[in-house]
Amino acid sequence: MMDSETWSIDPSAKTNNSFGCNPEERPLEELLECGIILVDKPPGPSSHQLAAWARSMLGIKRIGHGGTLDPFATGLLTLLCGRSTKITAELLRKPKSYVAVIRFKTPVPEDKLNSLVNAMKGEIFNVPPKESAVKVQVRTREVSESRLVQTEEGDRVHLLSISCEAGTYIRTMVKDLGLLSGNKCELLELHRSRSGPLEDQMACSMQQLADAVFLWKEHDDPRGLERLVCPVETVLNDIPRIVIKDGAVSALSHGAPLARPGVVSVPKGLPLGSSVLISSLKGEAVAISELSVHSDSIPEMKSGQIAAPKTVIMPPGTYPQTWSKD
């Protein structure tokens, strides 16, 4: 065993440094082909506008974003460059954390509000507000934290901390607080502080991004931009990881399933159907896959399919082909 949570299948496996690259050592050109930029969104522009501005600044064809923030909202917005747009759905599913400033029409005692806010933890009904582009329908969302942080202006203005399942509408939660308290409540400010493993402290401003692009394009100095464009693996660190041998990478990058002989290590306790990140020995993301067997059965296997790819991230040709086309 490699550690208490991982089965070590082939601890002697080595990687060839002639192929691939440690994600932290990728040149800027490769990062822009499959990397992420964490932006601290200011109030005003839409998420789509920020992505369009970044696309224009960097001069690359594809930039998407990993989760819309309303124009008035601020905080962490993940921009996905090039092939990293393939993981948009994965990023959208990750839990989010927010800080919200709310205001009641008339004062609400802190102890009463504390009780109401705490009651909004767990599974709640969360209907998209009319401002949303999503079809309005009743659905439930899981809220792991709903906490009153601070109170000002004579019990009218309050600061809340909320951690929740992806797709939770904070505006709806605030409206529900008003209904529960019998007192009209409005959302004054909303800041996204976390998305999955990513935090707002990791983000740059759009001005910092513009300055870094200027130095890169006008002074041939990529160092600032290299610090702002993160490897795509950064956003995938919270997914259970199967490490594979160099010889198995090429087949996976062409969309082939992972077979038992190519495995170096695998997490323990993952049931059939679990999502896993298939990674090279250098730590490169090859594909997001679905387990074809329970992970605890893999050490005893000699052959057979381990996982089927759902999203291939690594481009074919990064590692040499080791199978015959015949």
Image: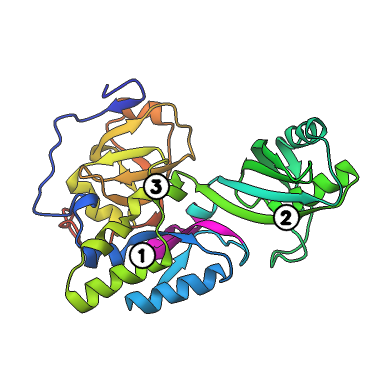
Above or below for 271 versus 202: above
Residue type, mark 2 in image: Leu
**Mark 2 nearby-residue class (10 Å; few <14, some 14–19, many ≥20):** some
Residue at the far front: name it.
154
Q: Earlier in the sequence, mark 1 or mark 2?
A: 2
Nearer the observer, disc 3 or disc 1? 1
User: Residue shown at 70%/56% (left/top)?
Assistant: 188
Task: Compute the Cα span from label 1 to label 2.
Answer: 29 Å
Earlier in the chain: of badge 3 and badge 2, it is 2
Q: In the image, which disc is placed on residue 236?
A: 3
Identify the image quadrant of the N terminus.
Answer: top left
Secondary structure of the residue carrying tag 2 is strand
Q: Quadrant of residue 225?
A: bottom left
Residue corresponding to mark 1: 208
Image side of residue 111 versus residue 279, left or right:
right
Distance from the alpha carbon under mark 3 to that under mark 1 = 25 Å
- Is 36 contained in the magenta span? no
Q: Which residues are magenta?
A: 73-90
The image shows residue 62 at horizontal and vertical percentages of: 39, 73
Name the secondary structure under disc 3. Answer: helix
In the displayed structure image, the side of residue 308 where residue 254 appears, left or right? left
**In the drawing, what numbered circle is on residue 86?**
none
Residue at image location 48% in from the left, 71% down from the top: 50
The C terminus lies in quadrant:
bottom left
Image coordinates of residue 222 in percent, x first then y, are 21, 66
Q: Which residue is mark 2?
A: 187
> Nearest the camera: 246 or 39?
39
Q: Are marks 3 and 2 in contact (CB under 8 Å)?
A: no
Q: Amino acid at mark 1?
A: Gln
- Residue shown at 27%/31% (left/top)? 302
Q: Earlier in the sequence, mark 3 or mark 1?
A: 1
Pick the residue in front: 2 or 220: 220
